[in-house]
Image: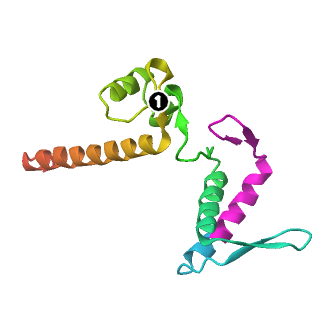
Amino acid sequence: MAFETIDGQPITVAAGDVQLAQRTAAALQRLVAEDGALDAAITTAEGDSVEIAPFLVAAFQQLASLLAQGDDVALVPVHKELSLTEAATLLHVSVPFLRRALDAQEIPSSGTGDDRRVRLSDLLTYKARRSDENRRDLATALAVAQEAGAYD
C-alpha cells in the first residue's frame, strides 16, 4: 500500500505498518475524545520530546485512521493549483465535463485552454456546493414521491 502527494512523490506503507497505524489511530482517538484534552508529545528514541499542537493531534488521528483502513492518502496544500487532469480526477468527472464547468465559470481558474489551473480550495468549494445541491434535489424528489404515494 502506498500514499502519494499530488506531486507524485510516493511513500510506501508496508503491510505490517497497517497494524501499527491501527494502534496509533486508536491511541490518538482516545486523546481526541477526551473533551478536547489534546495534550500530546512525540518522544524520540534519544529522549527528545516535542509538544504536538492540538490541531495536529486531530490531523494525525485522521491520517492514521485512513491508513489503518488501507486507504490511500494525498497530502496537498489547499492553495495548490491543479492541472485539468488532476482536478477532474479529484472530482471524479471527465476532463471535458470539467472544461464545461470552467467555461461556465462555475469554478474559478487561471490560464487558458488545456493549460488552465484550478486552485484546490476552489475545487473543494465547488464539490461541497454540488453535494449540497444534490442532497436538496434528492430530498425534493423524495418529498414529491412520498406525496404521490410512491412509498405507501
Whole-percent x, y for residue 81 in the image:
53, 36
User: Magenta segment, which residues?
Assistant: 1-28
- Hey, which residue is sitting farthest left in the picture? 148
Q: Is residue 145 left or right of residue 104?
A: left
Based on the picture, tell me whether residue 14 belongs to the magenta stretch.
yes
Q: Looking at the image, which residue is at 42% across and 29% down?
A: 93
Above or below: residue 34 compared with residue 42: below
Q: Looking at the image, which residue is at 53% across and 33% down?
A: 82
Whole-percent x, y for residue 89 in the image:
50, 31
Quarter-wise, where is residue 91 in the image?
top left
Quarter-wise, where is residue 74 in the image?
top right
Helix, strand or loop status at disc 1? helix
Q: Is residue 115 left or right of residue 37?
A: left
Work out whether residue 110 or residue 100 is closer to the camera in this orientation and state it. 110
- How crowded pointer 1 is (Cα within 10 Å; few <14, some 14-19, many 20+) is rated as some
- Hey, which residue is sitting farthest front in the picture? 111
Q: Looking at the image, which residue is at 36% across and 35% down?
A: 107
Q: Which residue is mark 1?
A: 88
Quarter-wise, where is residue 109 in the image?
top left
Whole-percent x, y for residue 15 in the image:
77, 47
**Mark 1 is on which residue type?**
Ala
Q: Looking at the image, which residue is at 47% across and 30% down?
A: 88
Work out whether residue 36 or residue 29 is closer to the camera in this orientation and state it. 36
How many numbered marks does the figure carry? Answer: 1
